Every structure is written in structure tokens, then in C-alpha cells.
Amino acid sequence: MTGQVTMVTGKRNRGGGWALSGLAWVVGLLFVLPVLWMVLTSFHAETDAAKNPPDLAAPLTLDGFRSFFDSGPWPSIANSLTASILSTVLVILLAFPAAYALSIKPVKKWTDVMFFFLSTKMLPVVAGLLPIYLFAQFAGLLDNIWLLIVLYTSMNLPIAVWMLRSFLAEVPVEILEAASVDGAGLTRTLRSVVAPVVTPGIASAALICFIFSWNELLFARVLTGTVAQTAPVFLTGFVTSQGLFLAKVCAASLVVSLPVLIAGFAAQDKLVQGLSLGAVK
Amino acid sequence: MSVDTEVRPGRHAAVPPNSSGTLMRRTGDWARRAPLMPALVFMIIVTQLPFVVTIIASFMNWNAYYPDERGFAGIDNFRRVLTDVNTRHAILVTILLTAGVVLISLLLGLAIALLLDRRFRGRGAVRTMMITPFLVVPVAAALLWKHALYNPEYGLFNGVLKWIFGDNAPQPDWISNQPLWSVIFALVWQWTPFMMLILLAGLQSRPLDVIEAAGIDGASKWDIFRYMTLPHLRQYLELSALLGSIYVVQNFDAVFTITSGGLGTANLPYTIYQTFYTAHDYGRASAAGVIVVIGTIVIATFALRSVSTLFKEEGR
């Protein structure tokens, strides 16, 4: 703020500016510190990780990672990838035409439809848990990854509809008119005319849907067992009451968070668009 | 960067000119609705149908351990839930947890967004560091706080105390001493970046020429902040508070991992999870679920009114 004003009025930053920049650095470091600590601890031996006060210079080792990978995490990681990727694809396939019908050629009462979608995000997930569990039991879908895929799709669909609508509303009218003059049908208009223009928006929506599906715990914990278990559920079962486990847990947490960290760092700006449901561009 | 305040509905005439008949108009309406239908039907089936079942179950005597006693219970479940001390406490915890996390992360997020809305060396790096907490999987973050930071024997917090004060340093058991605050701080750490990102985008969409003019006209920095920046940020503050509340009110991961709902930190999602998962009392879990939904609808009605400012209708 201060910097902004001095910048635009052309004054030089004096002592205050340095202090504020320093403060920004300190705050940033404080926020990232727990993650750095997690990374460092994951490379320590269990006995060094449990030292108090902590031993920063302890020798580095891959033992934590080794014991994590020895405990058989791959099926759960594969399940998480399947559930996150497939549900994200489904979300986009459903949300993209819906967003078209809510912006470019809007249905009557389209605002009501938008608020219906948003309102489903406000209904607590936990209140639908019992019927979904009973249905899954009845239909033999307990411990089946497809059940999670459907549920994650419903969890993220409202977010994607809101985001994509805001992007589609900005598609230039001329392009659409040209398409309709050329006699392009709905599918072709969506695929060859609208989709290329809003690719960044689709990418933002996909990123955020992937992250939320990857992170989900409650449904996965209640509805899956040994077969369809996802990575977050695997993590919760990883802490043992016996012996030292801190390095192992840090290594596991790091590995499970890695896909989200990479995707998020690679697409920081998309993250903002996604988090604000497309309201902030 | 801009907030999407205007939408442009009906850029194309609702009815093609040659189809004045009702039948044709209806066909046109359905052609418009067709792309929307798969998503809408999917959402109704997956999210609304279960709630109908929840409502029915909430009026039933239904415990999986006593299948023979299943039957109509009237409002018994609701009476039991509402008179139960634990549920009332869970409602209070849910409110404290949500309000605490949202307010603290909103204020911190605003302060940090103001700090980052300046040009300085390494601004991009600081921004990247700031968003890192949000990118840690919530369960992993909860495990990290519980075991690597809060742990009284080998956690980093007590380790730092020993570094500073030596061997006689106090070694508090953070989670046992302040269970609710322990959960709140872990969540604030994750949600401050979220608030900061939206508010920073808001700050950067301010009309700089107007602010410059105000500066030249002799407005103080505080005046510019109070009368120009803050009103401009209002809708961003509302948006981030609304979205933050939606997610935090449903929080399960942190409560489940850090305290396992113990020490008086069980919020409603955790309590319902337990009634259902451990006690198998389906009727009662459903009644609690219905109460949560009613509470959320009341809050959401107000929230939706504020978010409507982001979503103004034009010329319809």
C-alpha cells in the first residue's frame, strides 16, 4: 500500500520501505517454515528427528522415504490419481456445456440455476453421508473407486460451473455469430469455437478440481476399505503408537502433497481464478 | 484483474424470429436447456436425493445394531439431538472454529496482501512461500502440526523454546493445554494464503490513476486506505469470507487428525461422523444432519445476498 502510493507519486522508498519489505520476507518465511521443517525432518533418521532441541545438522538419509514406500502406498496413490483425474474430466465435460447454457445462450432463470449450484456447496457433505453409505452398501459399491469419482464430480461441479460461466461470458459475440452463420451445431460450436478461447479458464477449473479431489478425506475414509483407499486415508493410518515415526510421517506427507505442490506452483495465477470461482481474473 | 460484476445474458434473442408459435418457443427453450441438463440432473440426483433420505431417516428409530427396532420415531431424534449436551457443544465449537479461522485468516491475509502489494526485491518468491501452506494436503498439514510442531517432546515449538531459554525452558503440551486454538492455528496457517491471494488480486485491480489523483490532492495514506482501498476491497473481503466459511464450517480433517474430536474440539461434522460411523445410530445422525442443513440454509441465505453483489443482473 505504502509502496504503491510512493511508487505512483514518484517518491523514493526510504527507511519505511525497507522495513516493510523485510517484514514481508519474515512473514513469508514464517509461513513456509513448517513445510521446510517437514522436508528437513523427512530426510533425517528417526532418532535425530525426535531430538529436542532439534539437531539441524543431523546427517541426511532416505530411510524415512524408504520405510514409507516399503509400507505399500502405491495402490492408494494410484487410487487418488484415478479418482482425481477421472472426476476432473467428468466435471469439465458436464460443466462446460452447462456454462454455455448459463452464459452464451442463457436459459430462463439462469441466475436461479447458478445459485442452485452454489447452494449445493453449502450443504454440509456430512449430512449426505449416511444415505450415500447405505446406497453404496445396497448397490455393492462400497470400497469402489467409481463411487468416489461420482461423489468428487458432484463436489466440484458447482465450482467448475461458476468458473466456466464467468469465462464464457467474456467470449466475444462476433466469434459466436460467425459460428452460427456458418451453421455450426452446438457440439461443434463448443468444441471448435468456444473451447479454444476459454482454454485458460478450463485449465484453472481443472487445476482446482484436481486439488480438491486429491485432498478429500471424509468420503474416502467412510466409503473405502483396503481396495479403493486413497492417499489421504493411507496417511491417516500411517501413524503408529509404537516407536518413532516422525521422519516417516514427514516423508509420507511430503510425497502425498507433492502433486498438489507441483501443480499449484506451476499455475499460481490459475489458482487465484479457481479459488475465487472465476470472480477474480 | 477484475471482479466479474456484470454479466451479459440474452445477447442472442431468446426466440428465433420465424418461430412465434408456442410450440416452437418451447422447442427453443428446450434446445437452450439441453446443454445444461446433464449437469443439473447429475447434481440433483447426487446431492439432493440423499438429503431426502436423510430427512426421512431423521424421523426414524434406526440403529444398525438393533435392526428389529426400526420404525417411526416422530421427533424423538431431534429432541435427543437438541437436548444432548454434546451436540450443543459441537454447535458452539463449529461456530467458534469457523468464525475464529475465517476472521483471523482474513485479517492476516489482508495485512499480508498489503505488504505484497508493493514492489520489492523477491516479491515473487515471498508470494510463492506464502501460498505453500495452502498446497499441503490438509491431512498432511494436520499431521505436520500435530507431530512435528505441537508435540511436547520433540515438536519444533518446544525445540525453539529450548534453543532460546536453554534446558530449563517451559515445554508446554500445546494440544492438551489449548486444544481448540491448536486446531484453529493449524487451519489459519492453511487458510491465510487463500484469503491473501483473493485480496491481493483485489488490491491490484484498484484504479491507480484515481489513487494517484487523491495523493496529489493531499489525501493521507490512511485516508486513501480508509476511503478508497477498503470500499474497493469490500466485495473481495465478502467473497473470501464466504468461500472460506463454506470450507471451514465443514472441516473434518484437522479435527479428526489433531485431536480426534477429543478435549472438547468435536465440531458438528466430526460428531455426525461419529454418531454414524462408531455408534451406528442412523436416525440420530440424520437428525443432526438435518439440523446442520437448516442452520447452513439460514446462514447461506444471508451469505448469498452478499455474494449477489458479485453477480448483478442486467436488463432482464
Image (cartoon, coloured by chain):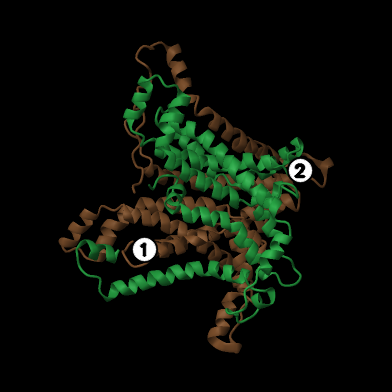
Crowd band around label 2 with a 10 angstrom C-alpha radius: few (<14), some (14–19), many (20+): many
* Residue type, numbered disc 1: Leu
Of the two numbered discs 2 and 1 on the same chain, state the one appearing first in sequence.
Answer: 2
Closer mark to the observer between disc 2 and disc 1: 1
Residue B177 to residue A234: above or below:
below
The residue at the point 66 percent across, 49 percent down is: A78
Dot 1 corresponds to which residue?
B116
The quadrant in which the C terminus of chain B is found is top left
The residue at the point 51 percent across, 44 percent down is: A206
Asked whether, in this view, residue B67 is left or right of residue A215, the answer is right
Q: Position of residue B101 (x, y in %)?
A: 51, 61
* Residue type, numbered disc 2: Trp
Q: Where is residue B150 in the image (x, y as percent from the top left)?
A: 60, 72
Residue B132 to residue A46: above or below:
above
Residue A145 visible in the displayed image: yes
Residue B130, image quadrant? bottom left
Q: Where is residue A41 in the image (x, y as percent from the top left)?
A: 61, 71
Q: Nearer the viewer, residue B185 or B145?
A: B145
The chain whose colour is green is A
Q: Position of residue A114 (x, y in %)?
A: 46, 36
The chain whose colour is brown is B
The residue at the point 35 percent across, 46 percent down is: B3
Disc sitting over residue B62 in the figure? 2
